[in-house]
Image (cartoon, rainbow, N blue to C red):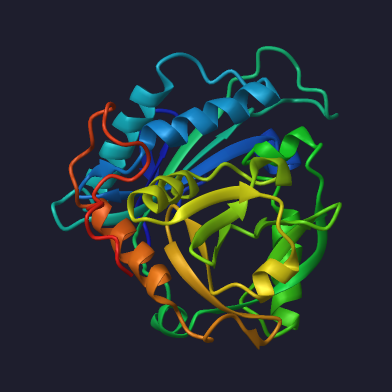
């Protein structure tokens, strides 16, 4: 079902109506940032973490979105979910927040002072990953695009996603499902829209933030989950050999959740099928969406997980 409304700068407008000026810098230059998240039964999952990352991106680009951003976004999401019929107890939605620097009359890359940001919220009924992906896993390849860990923009979730588009086209040409970026010095970084995790000898390993990756909210949850269920989380520098020789592998994102990776450039990873820890990670992550929000003093990162159920 296609959305009927979008939320723009505090009001609902028809989804099919004209929305943005052609002079908006998000359209002209990709001078904008965004976040995607899940909303279950009208509750925005981990909105505080997404807003924290959103603020960081805005600060780096010196886009002033004004005070009370989280409260304004929370109210806008609720309004949009209700309008789309996705705020009901059975509602499950994918939500995108986009904030651009706004429209400017002139040209050039240096932003003029006083530009009013454009704030947009969209929502769609949640579509789970294809059943075949969950049952068989993804085949991934290495992209020719490299991530530079020294580039401060690697920590910004900007709308400038041409690198990811190019990498997905590379994957399609190679008859693969997704592509993995390497750093400029050859270490694993992340997928085109997801963080990467490997199971190696009882360790839950993932590239560190020093590998030019986005600090994913699901990534943070999984690191806490790994501690609770008896794995040994490890953030570090890892190579394609670690991926090829892993016992299990998976990708993760806020909307899609945990997706198994079972082949690397056509060759099987581990047993060549989704492993027990991957299936457990997906099930526990999905279950936490139905759990009430945990108090701030509770164990970090992994609400809804029973630490006593540690067997795979």
Foreground of the two, 45 or 82 = 45
| Residue drawn at the location 49% of the way across and 49% of the way down | 219
Q: Is residue 99 visible?
A: yes
Give the image location of residue 134, x and y in percent: 42, 78
When the figure is inspected, residue 119 is found, relative to residue 189, above or below; the finding is: above
The answer to whether 188 appears left or right of 262 in the picture is right
Q: Classify residue 1 by image quadrant.
A: bottom left
When the figure is inspected, residue 185 is found, relative to residue 71, above or below; the finding is: below
The answer to whether 82 appears left or right of 207 in the picture is left
Q: Is residue 194 visible?
A: no
Q: Classify residue 176 by image quadrant.
A: bottom right
| Residue drawn at the location 38% of the way across and 75% of the way down | 276
Give the image location of residue 146, x and y in percent: 82, 56
The answer to whether 38 appears left or right of 88 in the picture is right
| Residue drawn at the location 65% of the way across and 18% of the way down | 115
| Residue drawn at the location 33% of the way across and 49% of the way down | 228
């Amino acid at each position: 079902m296609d959305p009927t409304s979008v939320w723009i700068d505090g009001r609902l407008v028809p989804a099919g109506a004209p929305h943005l000026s052609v002079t908006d810098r998000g359209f002209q230059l990709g001078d904008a940032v965004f976040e995607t998240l899940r909303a279950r039964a009208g509750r925005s999952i981990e909105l505080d973490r997404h807003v924290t990352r959103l603020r960081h991106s805005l600060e780096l680009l010196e886009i002033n979105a004004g005070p009370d951003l989280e409260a304004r976004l929370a109210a806008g999401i609720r309004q949009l979910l209700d309008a789309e019929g996705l705020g009901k107890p059975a509602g499950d939605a994918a939500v995108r927040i986009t904030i651009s620097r706004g429209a400017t009359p002139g040209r050039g890359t240096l932003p003029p002072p006083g530009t009013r940001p454009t704030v947009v919220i969209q929502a769609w009924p949640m579509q789970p990953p294809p059943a075949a992906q969950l049952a068989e896993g993804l085949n991934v390849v290495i992209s020719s695009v490299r991530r530079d860990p020294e580039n401060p923009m690697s920590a910004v979730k900007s709308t400038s996603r041409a690198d990811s588009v190019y990498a997905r086209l590379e994957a399609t040409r190679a008859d693969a499902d997704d592509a993995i970026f390497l750093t400029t010095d050859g270490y694993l970084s992340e997928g085109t829209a997801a963080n990467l995790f490997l199971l190696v000898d009882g360790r839950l390993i993932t590239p560190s933030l020093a590998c030019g990756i986005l600090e994913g909210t699901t990534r943070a949850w999984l690191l806490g989950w790994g501690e609770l269920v008896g794995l040994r989380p490890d953030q570090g520098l890892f190579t394609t050999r670690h991926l090829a020789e892993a016992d299990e592998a998976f990708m993760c994102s806020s909307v899609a959740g945990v997706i198994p990776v079972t082949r690397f450039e056509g060759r099987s990873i581990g047993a060549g099928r989704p492993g027990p820890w991957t299936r457990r990670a997906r099930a526990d992550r999905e279950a936490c969406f139905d759990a009430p929000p945990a108090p701030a003093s509770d164990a970090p990162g992994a609400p809804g997980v029973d630490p006593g159920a540690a067997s795979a």
